[in-house]
């Protein structure tokens, strides 16, 4: 201890938003506090949300020297801001042109207040230290990291719905097919890949050498890839694409990468409908295990959103990221057993390489999509719970990265 705050009395004049603080400040150090050396007591007013210093307040000085073990009566007044928000006032000993002692680890009197619709109130008064506040801010930040991404999406769900609809319709505006290209595009893409690998290269599913079996096997793997690759491929340029929103409007920029994820899900939705129709034509039935699809879709959305947030923020600083991601997605596609049987990995790679590739989240999704659509099996619990954990971590980390960098977007765009 370096100072003690005793007999504290803090009151607020609500009519003027003026706080009157009075207390006995006892010297618990081994040195004498001398006013002629610049010793006094002052206050700093901070924005509680951002930690920004707003007011470097007035000082009061003791009438005489305060020796070790002695006390001096301190009376200090300060005004709380009229703007709405949460504020923290740190009342602390200081030495003019030398230091504020709270920055040296000394305890200080903390007044926490809130202003709502111009009316101020004191929430709490206590003695604290900088380490205490840092610990509390860390816990609050950790809590916000878990809550804020979901809160942002929920609060802006209407905006996301409008933006996704506008994006899909705008992409095909003026074309003869219009919004039907949302269905035609995934169909043509899947048919193209099937023609290359199933017809030209003659790839076959080992348990059934027919072309229809390979088509079902291949297309099941394409379902999660369509949504993932569409969102991730566009995310590096999404901030540049909507730079007018970032620069000129008060806009929830965190929703822009989410729009891409939602747009990818719309594409996958139509692809799943087409695939189910294909299953009914070839096998004349749908397995009940397709009901497990939401168990795979949720971590898929979380993982895609996290990667999209990360790339959208990074793309503001590295404009050629879009070209790099195009190459990365191509490589990612071919190291994932989508267009070839999974057994080929075991036949051509060492066990440690296969084990490493099996940790690829898209690999897990592809494998379990095939399990529920073709194998009539529930998803593998051992792999899926790890997928949920990884997806949640990527989701939270991606949002934290985006949230940290978003203040720089307007300047760089």
Image (tube, rainbow, N blue to C red):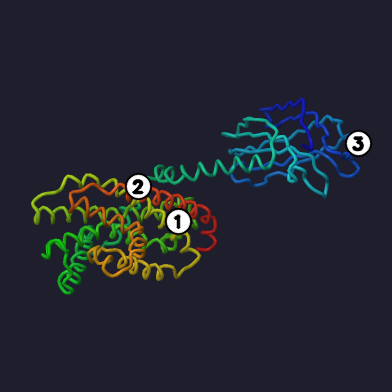
From the image, state whether disc 1 or disc 3 is nearer to you: 3
Label 3 crowd bin: few (<14), some (14–19), many (20+), radius 10 Å: some
Residue 232: assigned label: none
In the rendered image, which residue does mark 3 sit on?
65
Asked which secondary structure carries label 3, the reply is: loop
Q: Which residue is mark 2?
A: 385
Q: Which mark is residue 245?
A: 1
Query: Mark 1: which secondary structure?
Result: helix
Q: Are marks 2 and 1 in contact (CB under 8 Å)?
A: no
Residue 69 in the figure: left or right of residue 354: right
**Where, by quadrant of the figure, is residue 39 drawn?**
top right
Q: Position of residue 303 (x, y in %)?
A: 38, 53
- Chain-order first, disc 3 or disc 2: 3
Q: Residue furthest bottom?
A: 200
- Taking depth in this image into account, of 270 and 387 the one nearest to the observer is 387
Kindly identify the residue that appears in the image at 75 percent across and 27 percent down. 8
Mark-to-mark CA distance, 2 and 1: 38 Å
Against 277, residue 339 (above or below) is below
Q: Residues within 10 Å of mark 1 (few under 14, many from 20)?
A: some
Q: Residue at x 40, y 71 (%)?
A: 323
**Residue 182 spot, x, y in % from top left:** 24, 58
Between circles 3 and 2, the one closer to the viewer is 2
């Amino acid at each position: 201890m370096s100072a003690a705050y005793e007999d504290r009395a803090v009151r607020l004049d609500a009519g003027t938003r003026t706080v009157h603080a009075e207390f006995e400040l006892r010297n618990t150090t081994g040195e004498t506090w001398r006013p002629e050396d610049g010793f006094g007591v002052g206050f700093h007013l901070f924005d509680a949300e951002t930690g920004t210093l707003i007011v470097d307040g007035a000082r009061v000085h003791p009438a005489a020297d305060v020796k070790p073990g002695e006390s001096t009566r301190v009376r200090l007044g300060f005004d709380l801001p009229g703007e709405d928000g949460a504020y923290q006032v740190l009342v602390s000993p200081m030495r003019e042109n030398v230091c504020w002692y709270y920055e040296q680890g000394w305890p200080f009197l903390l007044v926490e207040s809130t202003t709502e619709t111009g009316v101020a109130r004191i929430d709490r008064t206590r003695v604290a230290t900088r380490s205490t506040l840092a610990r509390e801010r860390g816990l609050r930040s950790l809590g916000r990291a878990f809550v804020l991404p979901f809160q942002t999406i929920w609060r802006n769900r209407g905006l996301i719905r409008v933006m996704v609809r506008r994006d899909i319709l705008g992409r095909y505006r003026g074309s003869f097919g219009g919004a039907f290209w949302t269905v035609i595009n995934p169909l043509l893409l899947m048919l193209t890949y099937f023609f290359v690998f199933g017809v030209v290269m003659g790839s076959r599913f080992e348990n059934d050498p027919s072309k229809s079996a390979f088509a079902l096997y291949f297309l099941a793997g394409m379902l999660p890839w369509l949504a993932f690759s569409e969102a991730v491929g566009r995310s590096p340029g999404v901030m540049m694409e909507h730079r007018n929103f970032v620069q000129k409007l008060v806009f929830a920029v965190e929703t822009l990468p989410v729009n891409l994820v939602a747009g990818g899900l719309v594409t996958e939705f139509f692809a799943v409908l087409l695939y189910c129709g294909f299953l009914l034509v070839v096998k004349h039935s749908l397995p009940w295990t397709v009901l497990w699809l939401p168990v795979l879709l949720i971590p898929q959305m979380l993982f895609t959103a996290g990667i999209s947030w990360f790339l959208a923020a990074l793309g503001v600083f590295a404009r050629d990221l879009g070209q790099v991601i195009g190459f990365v997605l191509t490589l990612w596609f071919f190291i994932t057993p989508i267009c070839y049987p999974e057994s080929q990995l075991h036949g051509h790679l060492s066990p440690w390489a296969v084990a490493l590739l099996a940790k690829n989240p898209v690999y897990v999704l592809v494998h379990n999509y095939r399990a529920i659509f073709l194998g009539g099996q529930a998803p593998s619990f051992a792999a899926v719970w790890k997928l949920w954990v990884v997806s949640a971590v990527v989701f939270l980390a991606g949002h934290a990265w985006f949230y940290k960098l978003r203040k720089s977007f307007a300047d760089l765009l």
